[in-house]
Amino acid sequence: MPPSKSPAQALLEKADKKANSSTGWFSSSSTKFEEAGDLYQQAANSFKLEKLFREAGMHFPRRLSAEKNATRQMMPLMLDTVYVRARLNHE
């Protein structure tokens, strides 16, 4: 039996699907990237809760990338990324 996925890994898969999906008739590409960015954020936070800071640090930039495509404000997202990376350097 294959090992079960952690909640963070399941969120990452959903985020990847959302980011790589095509837009429908009534949805915009920015909405797609916003939703993918939110899922990447949830996944990164789940990794932080599991004390897997390296994995969290790898996925905050993915959120930044998705959010850049959605044109949201970037500063809070950049601060999250810097915080996790700083935590990695202290381990």
Image (cartoon, rainbow, N blue to C red):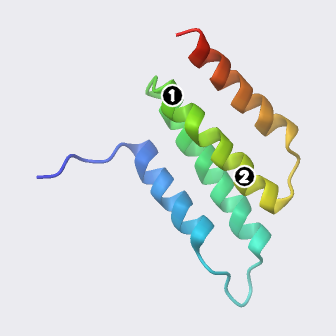
Q: Position of residue 30 (x, y in %)?
A: 79, 68
User: Which amino acid type corresponds to the residue marked 2 in the rendered image?
Assistant: Ser
> Label 1 to label 2, Cα distance in Å?
18 Å
Graded by Cα atoms within 10 Å as few (under 14), some (14 to 19) or many (20 or more), the crowding at tag 2 reads some
The secondary structure type at the circle numbered 2 is: helix
Which residue sits furthest bottom?
25
Residue 70, percent across and down?
80, 61
Q: Residue at the far front: name it.
A: 89
- Say which residue appears at 58% left-offset and 44% top-offset: 42
Nearer to the camera, 33 or 86: 86
Say the numbered circle drawn on residue 19.
none
Kindly identify the amino acid type of the residue bearing the numbered disc 1.
Arg
Residue at image mark 2: 65
State left or right for residue 10 relative to residue 67.
left
User: Residue 59: where, in percent of width, then height?
Assistant: 58, 42
Percent x, y of residue 17: 52, 67
Q: Circle 1 is placed at which residue position?
A: 54
